[in-house]
């Protein structure tokens, strides 16, 4: 058995006999002595073999990168000049006495330190080599610590870990389901769950009181950079707790997690209504570390004789907002053009701006192509409201409210990053008081969260004025990322049916899709609510990973494939016949 | 917030004001006072409402079974005559002061204590009601404690919890895969994993050193009573440990689990070679609590002139064995007929027997239809070997070895249960030294475990005499149930290819199916091995559940359906078109 992991040997072990297992990270030959850097999960240690170890020296001479070794030896202090302060084991080395080659290794398809040049496809094909890189190992180790910390917290707080099915019925999250043909029920299909939502509610109806699960969820969607077809959710539900209590306990969990794995005290999370978040940051997941925000100038712009501004300013569904970037006057025309292109992704038709060169000079001290369209008085009032200073820049958005919010919200984050203006490491936040519904592109109301979210009003008020109804929902946001979201759920059939009616889900459809839930609500459902956190995103934030693929052991590519195992693969006809399906004959493109 | 769970209030809380949440288990009206049994996850407490609580009394008068309540009141001692020693809260009651009805409940489809009469289909359709039964709640609570205990043990021993994919490639376990059509890769399919076997081996190649996962696995097989299409596996893999070390650490885990959740000390597990287990118990998962075993009588039977016995006795692939049941002479002819029918399930063509009425009387003291076919001397020798006593019965199996083992092995367990002869509560055991291969019905060699299991010999010896090769595999058995099994894996490509050759897997097939594994073994794979435990079966054993469905929150029926959600369900044509599949037009039966 090993006595130590390579990376954990310190000066405290000097003169101890050690047995190590690991991979050859590097082999050098220097002054007739062989130096091996031996690597395992915990790090690297230097092992020295002198010629007087005979056959062990000869083996040490033979080994190559990534050979697998067992080494026995004695720990000794390095001599003065050879101490390496950049290595955790840099003060010591192991004087090798025995070496056994447990396995040889062909020359790897890439050297561990050359992963950037080889590109992600090669890394994914040889994932087992890519995962040897300390940086990748550390991410998976930390992921394991995160789940362990969260499980302990939930176990200790009386939450029961309960598994819900993977082979289940289509769920109402709205994304595309993965389907699994049933062999025994001809022509029918299971769906892989987009979340355990309905099952966890049923567990509350069954009296489990506090439930959690670290659950695999599935969405067959075209993948964006930070999405995977299968992802992992920390899924939580409780009975007899209100929104404040649920937020308190889950905030406690995240706070304890950060303390435990990062030794960071997040403090108490501020709370912000959805409307305020949209108003000030154009986003329901604002990054509070960026020290500037959106300011409404609707009232001022209603008066100007410039259609680009006064149109949206006078439209009840429009908005004109200003984003003052302190010190942003240094942004070049070229950069402004780039930002204009950037906001156009979100539908913005342009990006007006004013540079503040000299506040004392009044209008003369401003520089902008749009000044000529606005009365000086309005400009002066605006500058006063924005409290501008020399060297600032102000950007403007004027359009449908949703476009202004998205465009300026994204611009704020982009400029914050580009100008390196992010202040502090961690800015957590609860966003609350969400609307129950939003309008989709066809002008119909859809649930902002999901149709089981409880409104903060009566069923009658809800049906009378659904656009105004707020939900008892809450999102936990960290550094501009939504870590998790949840709500108090509807626990009475009347209310659930009222919501279905607002959503245009008829009785028959409701019965077919959610009959079992409506039934369950009849038979004594307790008040209940919960939350789900995205584990992958949480680990990304904690590890500072740039890609979700870096925090998943065996991720899929953006086309939802595994290049290592070559999945998905062909199925044979016998299998398909058993499943009562066949492939479509014509390629999709030809239809 | 609740101050107590109902079931947790004891005399220690007398005079305390409590706030409780729960369901009305029973409501009685007695002497102008209302008694409510209030039930939650932890149990039941009696709440008394006097008329002087006014509207609260009136509400208490209105509630019905399964209504959901909030109750505030004061704990008091019950009067002498009303103490209920059968209830954990039977010494106290709560004098109700406030009652709020949080939800009403329609009359449930079955009363909680009538679950037996309603049958399992109704229970599964209204699973959320069935799960309210304390007996079901307790099983899920215990399941959560089991996973929590196991996770803590593994976390504390340096195992990393790492998730492997659910959408993956067909795996080689040999059962039928569930397939998932890919939308983005036309005509191709993912398979749901039958186990994370190859991924966990790759994690060892990547240097994770110690891995675990409580993993969902899937098999699309016709379900037997104790099977489910999706089941859960405690999956473990380590590097640089040999079989002894792996057995020691996983045995420690199970021992700690039993200590923690049952306060049972399992002691050190005995070890038994596969050959001995088959010889003595006719099973590779013997229940050591049954105090009788199989005894070989081949040598004696070779000499008799009775074809039923001397045929198998002289066949190298045959076996004649005796099973002596102490005190079994009381078994009736009718029961013997039933046992004869029982062993015929396993292919036994009959069931010979001898009752020992009076040992002192020699042959005269025996009773059996087969005595006439055997020389007295042989019978006498046999009785001596079996050390029979008055009142015993001896059964015989004579057939192909595999049939004798299966039939007498099963008979042994059945009689042990029928005659209530099981001794002790827990009998754990390691079965070791399995053969590498067994012959399938077509006479080809297949892996007894799986093709990645390491043999205890060299590749050359393996290929020369595969039938004789033993594997470095081990099964953990408890009370006649296989709790888990594992092996040291092959870590060198030469050996892996030798095994593939023995199995008749050609180079091309090996490359196509396992190319990524063969590759991985080339690039510095460490010696590694592991084990997987069946969580559902482990929880069944610990809870004494009779059905696997009782330890799963939302199980499938034997036809692999969920009667609650009505899954699997229909898919619409748009979905199928996107997945590039269609239903077969002709019903399967018509083909």
Image (cartoon, coloured by chain):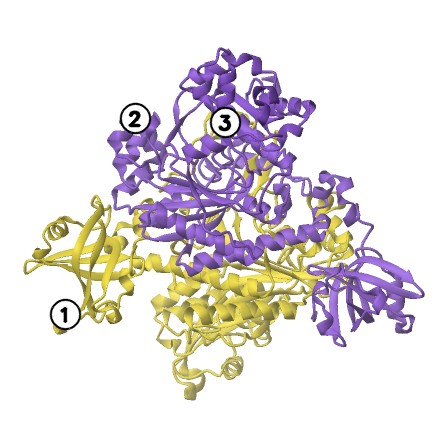
Chain colours: A purple, B yellow
Label 2–label 1 contact, CB within 8 A: no
Residue with the mark numbered 1? B82
Q: Would you say B542 lies left or right of B238 here? A: left
Foreground mark, 1 or 3? 3
Label 3 SS: helix
In percent of width and height, residue B253 lies at 53, 68
C-alpha distance separating marks 2 and 1? 55 Å
C-alpha distance separating marks 1 and 3? 78 Å
Q: Chain of mark 2?
A: A
Q: Would you place residue B498 above or below residue A587 in this image? A: below
Q: Furthest-bottom residue in view?
A: B360
- Residue at the spot 68% in from the left edge and 39% down from the top edge: A563
Label 1 SS: helix
Residue with the mark numbered 2? A465
Count of picture labels: 3
Q: Is residue A280 visible?
A: yes
Q: Would you say A590 lies left or right of A214 here? A: right
Q: Would you say A429 lies left or right of B141 here? A: right
In percent of width and height, residue A589 lies at 61, 20
Are discs 1 and 3 both within one chain?
A: no
Quarter of the image where the N terminus of chain A is located:
bottom right
C-alpha distance separating marks 2 and 3? 38 Å
First along the sequence among labels 2 and 3: 3
Dot 3: within a 10 Å radius of its alpha carbon, few (fewer than 14), some, or many (20 or more) residues? Answer: few
Are discs 2 and 3 both within one chain?
A: yes
Indicate which disc residue A384 carries. 3
Q: Chain of mark 3?
A: A
In percent of width and height, residue A152 lies at 48, 59
Dot 1: within a 10 Å radius of its alpha carbon, few (fewer than 14), some, or many (20 or more) residues? Answer: few
Label 2 SS: loop
Q: Would you place residue A503 above or below residue B318 in this image? A: above
């Amino acid at each position: 058995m090993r006595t130590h992991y390579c990376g954990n040997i310190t000066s405290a072990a000097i003169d101890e006999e050690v047995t190590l297992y690991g991979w050859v990270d590097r082999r050098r030959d220097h002054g007739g002595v062989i130096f091996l850097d031996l690597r395992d999960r915990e790090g690297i240690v230097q092992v020295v073999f002198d010629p007087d170890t005979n056959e062990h020296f000869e083996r040490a001479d033979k080994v190559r990168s990534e050979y697998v070794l067992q080494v026995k030896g004695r720990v000794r202090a390095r001599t003065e000049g050879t101490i390496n302060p950049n290595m955790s084991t840099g003060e010591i080395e192991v004087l090798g006495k025995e070496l056994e080659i447990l396995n040889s290794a062909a020359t790897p398809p890439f050297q561990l330190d050359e992963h950037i040049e080889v590109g992600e496809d090669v890394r994914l094909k040889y994932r087992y080599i890519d995962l040897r890189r300390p940086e990748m190992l550390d991410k998976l180790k930390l992921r394991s610590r995160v789940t362990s910390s969260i499980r302990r917290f939930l176990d200790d707080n009386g939450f029961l870990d309960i598994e819900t099915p993977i082979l289940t019925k289509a769920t109402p999250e709205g994304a595309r389901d993965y389907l699994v043909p049933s062999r025994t029920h001809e022509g029918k299909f299971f769906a892989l769950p987009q979340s355990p939502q309905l099952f966890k509610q049923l567990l509350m109806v069954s009296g489990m009181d506090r439930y959690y699960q670290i659950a695999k969820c599935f969405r067959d969607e075209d993948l964006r950079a930070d999405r995977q077809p299968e992802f992992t959710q920390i899924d939580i539900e409780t009975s007899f707790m209100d929104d404040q209590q649920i937020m308190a306990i889950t905030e406690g969990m995240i706070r304890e997690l950060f303390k435990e794995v990062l030794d960071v005290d997040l403090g108490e999370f501020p709370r912000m209504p959805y409307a305020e978040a949209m108003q000030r940051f154009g986003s329901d997941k604002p990054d509070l570390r960026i020290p500037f925000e959106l300011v409404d100038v609707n009232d001022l712009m209603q008066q100007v004789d410039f259609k680009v501004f006064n149109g949206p300013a006078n439209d009840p569904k429009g908005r004109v907002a200003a984003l003052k970037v302190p010190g942003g006057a240094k942004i070049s025309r070229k950069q402004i053009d780039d930002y204009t292109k950037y906001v156009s992704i979100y539908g913005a038709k342009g990006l007006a701006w004013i540079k503040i060169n000299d506040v004392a000079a009044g209008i003369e001290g401003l520089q902008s192509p749009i000044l000529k369209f606005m009365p000086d008085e309005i400009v002066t009032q605006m500058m006063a409201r924005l409290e501008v200073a020399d060297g600032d820049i102000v950007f403007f958005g004027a359009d449908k409210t949703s476009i202004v919010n998205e465009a300026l919200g994204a611009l704020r984050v982009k400029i914050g990053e580009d100008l390196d203006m992010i202040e502090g490491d961690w800015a957590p936040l609860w966003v609350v008081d969400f609307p129950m519904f939003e309008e989709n592109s066809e002008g119909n109301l859809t649930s902002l969260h999901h149709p089981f979210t409880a409104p903060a009003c009566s069923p009658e008020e809800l049906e009378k004025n659904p656009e105004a109804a707020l939900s008892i929902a809450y999102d936990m946001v960290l550094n501009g990322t939504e870590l998790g979201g949840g709500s108090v759920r509807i626990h009475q059939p009347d209310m659930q049916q009222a919501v279905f009616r607002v959503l245009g889900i008829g009785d028959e459809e409701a019965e077919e899709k959610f009959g079992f839930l409506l039934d369950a609500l009849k038979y004594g459902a307790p008040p209940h609510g919960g939350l789900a956190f995205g584990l992958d995103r949480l680990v990304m934030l904690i590890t500072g990973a740039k890609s979700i693929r870096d925090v998943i052991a065996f991720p899929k590519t953006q086309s939802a494939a595994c290049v290592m195992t070559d999945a998905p693969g062909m199925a044979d006809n016998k299998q398909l016949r058993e499943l009562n399906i066949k492939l479509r004959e014509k390629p999709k493109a030809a239809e």
